[in-house]
Amino acid sequence: MFKIGRVCIKLAGRDAGKKCVVVDVLEGKYVMIEGQTRRRKCNILHLEPLEQVLDIEKNASHDNVMKALGFEPVHTKTKAKTQKPQKGKKAPKREAKTPKVAKKKSKK
């Protein structure tokens, strides 16, 4: 029943209610899923199989799975790397220019 390409709905966990596709069948009752969910190993008891079967290859990439499901793949923006400031010679330390106050002598 759970073959590569089977479209399912996730029933449990934080991805519950989202569509996913079986991309690999693992040992026992586990399959590898991908789609609107995170790519991860999932127990088949936590999946509701749908009638739809997609023509995808084993361990298909996220982009290929999302295109087959009819969704646009979501790409995260990467920040451009900036150069670190170069270490230069340290400037000589300056002495504080505070005026010295003379102590007043008290009369006894």
Image (cartoon, rainbow, N blue to C red):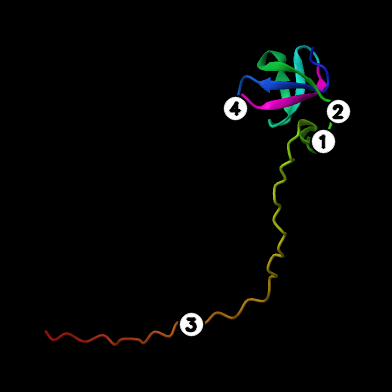
Q: Foreground mark, 1 or 4?
A: 1
- Number of the label disc, if any, that sits on residue 106: none
Cα distance between the residues tagged 2 and 4: 25 Å
Quadrant, the C terminus? bottom left
The picture places residue 89, in percent across and down from the top left corner, at: 67, 76
Quadrant, the N terminus? top right
Q: Foreground mark, 2 or 4?
A: 2
- Number of the label disc, if any, that sits on residue 64: 1
Q: Secondary structure at mark 3?
A: loop
The picture places residue 107, in percent across and down from the top left corner, at: 13, 86
Using the image as rendered, state which of residue 105 and residue 99 is in the foreground: 99
Assess whether mark 1 and mark 2 are in contact (beta carbons under 8 angstroms).
yes
Q: Is residue 58 left or right of residue 86?
A: right
- Number of the label disc, if any, that sits on residue 14: 4
Check disc 1 and give the amino acid type: Asn
Residue at the (63%, 27%) spot, across then down: 15
Sequence-earlier tag: 2 or 1: 2
Q: Foreground mark, 1 or 3?
A: 1
According to the image, label 3 marks what residue?
95
Residue at the (72%, 59%) spot, across then down: 80
Q: Residues within 10 Å of mark 3 (few under 14, many from 20)?
A: few
Check disc 4 and give the amino acid type: Arg
Cα distance between the residues tagged 1 and 4: 23 Å
Using the image as rendered, state which of residue 5 and residue 87 is in the foreground: 5
Cα distance between the residues tagged 3 and 4: 61 Å
What are the residue bounds of the magenta stretch?
Answer: 16-26
Sequence-earlier tag: 2 or 3: 2
